[in-house]
Amino acid sequence: MSAISAGEIEERRRSRLHVALGIFTLIVVAAAQALLDPALPLDLLFVLPVAVIAMAGGRPLGVTSGVAAAVLRSLVELWRGPGHEHPAIAVLSFLLGALVYMLTAWFAAEITTAALRARASALTDPLTGLGNRRFFEDVAERELNRSQRYARPLALAFINIDDFRSVNEERGHAAGDALLRRVAQELPSGIRRSDIVARLGGDVFAVLLPETPAEGAEVAMGKLRERLRATAREGGFDVRFSVGVATLDTGATTLKALMSAADATMYAAKRTGQGLVVGDASLPVTQVDAAADPD
């Protein structure tokens, strides 16, 4: 996966906006409690902004907002004048209010955390820990739209382990799984923080390279391919890798078309044994490191 993707940046911006709206709502509820009929149970409305802040900002910020809500409610009651016959009752009212609001924040944050974990699990490949196809297509669709909107370059690479089947047949599926995990561990260290990596299934991985033209993708994937071969050999696997790269320059206007082009170039690299093919496989392509890599 990418360390910081455009989708994550947008999600953080949305969370900050929700926290700000929650704080604003806390102030509005306190003002309404101060100005409207005291008989109205407006103090119950503090629960809503506290829950929103906890869901968007997390448990610590949510609990803090719960305490703030109890303080605001007590200040409004003091401003109106003593509403209780004994100070102990006022203190008890404050403590009970704080407890209710803090528990609201706690459970709202827990529910949000559980939902996020479930979503992350649904978007993660259980064997390698990388994003799965669903995750990749979701992120890649947003990146493609952004690249087209601002006329920015975008490259997509498909990476295939050429001899993976023989590893499974000769050494067993446990060895094949170990190879996949080794490749998955190396992939993020061989790309930029802005790139997105995922396992699409079987022995095929994908790398999305925003702001990258064909020439830059060729250099980056050539280096990455060598890193993958080196780490595989360190683990006792004498395997080769075929990499196919497609870019928006090839005329692909949809994610499906871009992925089809990358898939075609990957298989072109596999068939020719050149290791890396850049461009649309239906058009003349650039084949690199053939001389340096005779296998």
Image (cartoon, grey):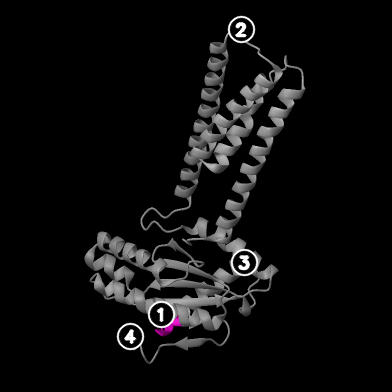
Q: Which residue is drawn at 53% across and 19% down?
A: 96
Q: Residue at x 25, y 63 (%)?
A: 175
Which comes before the other along the chain, label 2 or label 3? 2
**Depth-wise, is mark 3 or mark 1 nearer the camera?**
1
| Picture coordinates of residue 71, whole percent (x, y) | 59, 27
Question: The C terminus lies in which quarter of the figure?
Answer: bottom left
Q: Please check the rendered image and state whether residue 270 is part of the magenta-colored stretch, yes or no.
A: yes
Return the mark for residue 144.
Answer: 3
Residue 145 placement, left or right of 207: right
Does dot 2 land on a helix, a strand or a loop? loop
**Label 3 crowd bin: few (<14), some (14–19), many (20+), radius 10 Å:** many
Q: Are marks 1 and 2 in contact (CB under 8 Å)?
A: no
Label 2 and label 3: CA atoms lie apart by 66 Å
Does dot 3 land on a helix, a strand or a loop? helix
Label 4 and label 1: CA atoms lie apart by 16 Å
Does dot 1 land on a helix, a strand or a loop? helix
Label 4 and label 3: CA atoms lie apart by 34 Å
* Residue bearing mark 4: 295
Q: Residue at x 38, y 92 (%)?
A: 291
Which comes before the other along the chain, label 4 or label 1? 1
Q: Which residue in the rendered view is the most extreme toward the bottom?
A: 291
Q: Residue at x 67, y 23 (%)?
A: 76
Amino acid identity at mark 2:
Glu
Range of residues picked out in magenta:
269-276
| Picture coordinates of residue 241, whole percent (x, y) | 37, 76
Residue 84 placement, left or right of 128: right
Front residue of this view, candidates 119 and 86: 86
Label 4 and label 2: CA atoms lie apart by 90 Å
Amino acid identity at mark 1:
Lys
